[in-house]
Image (tube, rainbow, N blue to C red):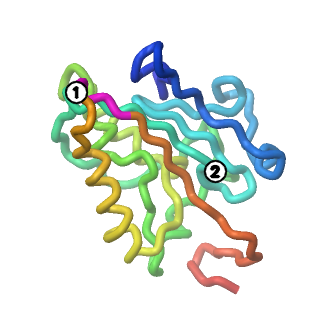
Amino acid sequence: MVGYDPEFLGTDFPLPMPSFSPTLVGNVLRKPELRDDIYVDYINFTVIMNRVRRSPLVTALNIDQNLLKKVQRKRGWDIDTRVGRKYQLDNDYYANNDWDRGHLARRASAAWGNSKQEARRASDATFFFTNAALQHENFNQDEWLALENWVRNLTLDQNGLITEFTGPIYGDFGRTVTPSGRQP
């Protein structure tokens, strides 16, 4: 499976996956099932997981605006067995509360390829819990959506190629989110 391509924008402008501070490097999920033990590759994007938070540290997405396709949205989210249930927040964390499953690699931006079938597979690949972070519903459906739309509609470059990095920002506070969405 081809994930994020660091040379997507050209060999003159490589964008490697980020490295992490000593504070975060110990939180990176490492499993032999993953590329280089840390990279969770999907079609057009790659995720590095935070084993402590059970959500992504970062996602890296290649977007080819020339090959974007409108495809039907997949129903439901899945556990990625390469990562394991233990290291992902499943639907229990998002049900019946104010938290949305916030796509980090946006479905509509990942939905590109040489054919509609390729674009559909790329779109479907965004529906793994490894590509979701807890986002308050107001933020997810307003500010985050506006930012996603702005990126998707960028026309600053003539070739229509965009690279996008996203990831949650956690503060230094000791709150825990339980499956019911309550914060003790």
Q: Quadrant of the C terminus?
A: bottom right
Q: Residue at x 55, y 42 (%)?
A: 80
Q: Which mark is drawn over residue 8?
A: none
Residue toward you, 50 or 21: 21
Give the labeled residue for mark 2: 85
Instruction: Name the kind of residue labelled 1 in the image.
Output: Gln
Q: Residue at x 26, y 37 (%)?
A: 156
Magenta segment: does it hold 105?
Answer: no
Circle 2 Cα neighbour tier, 10 Å, few/some/many (<14 / 14–19 / ≥20): some
Main secondary-structure element of the magenta-colored stretch: loop
Residue 76 image offset from top left, x and y in percent: 37, 55
Residue closest to the eye, 88 or 150? 150
Residue extent of the magenta highlight: 158-162
Vertical comparison of 94 with 13: above or below:
below
Going by the image, does 27 lie left or right of 106? right
At horizontal 36% and vertical 68% (from top left) the residue drawn is: 143
Residue 159 painted magenta: yes
